[in-house]
Amino acid sequence: MENTNSQSVVNSSRRQFLKTSSAAALSGTLASPLVFTRRAAGGSSDNVLKIGLVGCGGRGSGAAAQALSTSEAVVLTAMGDVFADRLQSSRKNLSREDKFGSRVRVPDSACFVGLDAYQKVIDSGVDVVLLATPPGFRPQHLRAAVEAGKHVFCEKPVATDAFGVRSVLESAAKAKEKNLSLVVGYCWRYDPARRAFYQKIHQGAIGPVRAIYATYLTSPVKAMPPASSRPAGMGDVEWQIANWYNFVWLSGDGLVEQACHSIDKIAWAMKGVLPLKAVATGGRQFPNNEGNIFDHIDVFYEFPEGVRAFMAQRQIRGCYSDNSDYLMCGDGVGTIKRELTLTGKENWRYSGPKADMYQVEHDELFASIRSGKPINDGVWAAHSTLMALMGRMAAYTGKEVSWDEAMNSQEKLVPDNLTWDMKLPIKPMAMPGQTKFV
């Protein structure tokens, strides 16, 4: 689902979208009243915002492009990654004259490489930090950015274990105290069509939600290469980060890293009401060499008043693909597929403005910073992440897992005091019925 390309949004479409998003708070996201276009913002030095990028892969480079597209008065001044070649490739691409040219002001001295690169970017004098490393690192990076008083764009999911979720909730509270903006990359929350759809649902257009069926049936995101392809001298940490999607401590599993979008939409439909418990099935159909994530998980959530939600996630080649949402309500059905429709007591089809949701995330983030009216997505984003994690916990252990059990889990996946040359054995793949809930 991640779109790594920077796509321009027509300014009139942005204005029309923002005019029609007055009920965004009902949808779980606050829309800022202003979008600073390049022309409107001007380029005077007193309103320039300096951004720093942490994680220079495709998604990070895309986030930097979208941040720079919000205004001529935004400049990129620092970049950090654990891989020097990835950083240099991103810097070269972003600084092309047909991209952002002189507004990429990242000298060699502001190119930081290593596991501590995030802290060096934060300490370099930037105003806004873009966090786009593998999810396992996000709680630590977010905490450091908020403690330093920086506004943040943080990609989803926000953690890979409950320790991380609890840390993110603390950081979100601290960001609120400091009047800092924190936008999280659950991008569908910034899509005008889905905002309109969920506004209709919340207004009761087809009655109360009774059940939700969400699908995330796709091919694998990143295949794990054979162990024999590991270069001589490459340590455990470098090897696992290079193939981060295939390791639970880094990605959280496909359910958490990818299908979290669908799980977030379940949470959105439920207006943030937390699930009581979940059971799940899942496993690994095809060998994954050294990796330890499942390639399919189905989760069954139970909410108050008997409401149920079903999440079907699979990442196997050659299978039926579907990425849709089906809401069964008291007086009709809501469907998000190729089109967004309601049928029943009210028949409705979305026909409003279109906008690049990845760009809208940054338009609203930077407008909130300039207006002094911060957006803070932290709590609901942490809750959506934990919903995904509780599904994984239930699938890996074969147990019924309650919300409180998931929130208070003592399983810590991300190593403390990580160093580049440390030994980091790969944990075996979970076995339902044998793997213990911690």
Image (cartoon, grey):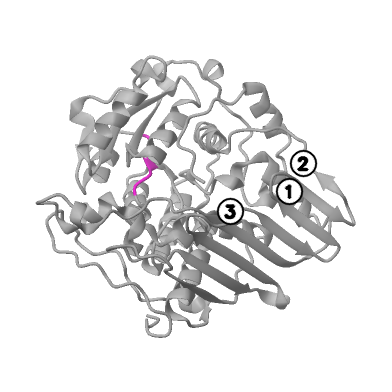
Label for residue 321?
Answer: 3
Residues rendered magenta in the picture: 127-133
- Secondary structure beneath dot 3 equals loop
Residue 151, picture quadrant: top left
Q: CA distance from mark 1 to mark 3?
A: 23 Å
Q: Measuring 53% from the left and 28% from the top, which residue is drawn there?
A: 7
Q: Measuring 37% from the left and 51% from the top, which residue is drawn there?
A: 142
Residue 62 higher or lower than 99, as above or below: below
Q: Are marks 1 and 2 in contact (CB under 8 Å)?
A: yes
Residue lying furthest left: 233
Frontmost residue, 338 versus 153: 338
Residue type, numbered disc 2: Tyr
Label for residue 350?
Answer: 2
Q: Which residue is mark 1?
A: 197
**N-terminal of the two: label 3 or label 2?**
3
Count the marks.
Answer: 3
- Report crowding for label 1: few under 14, some 14 to 19, many 20 or more residues within 10 A (C-alpha): many
Q: Position of residue 322 (x, y in %)?
A: 61, 54
Horizontal relation, residue 69 to residue 347: left or right: left
**N-terminal of the two: label 1 or label 3?**
1
Q: CA distance from mark 3 to mark 2?
A: 23 Å
Horizontal relation, residue 233 to residue 98: left or right: left
Q: CA distance from mark 1 to mark 2?
A: 7 Å
Residue 330 higher or lower than 89, as above or below: below
| Discs 3/2, front | 3
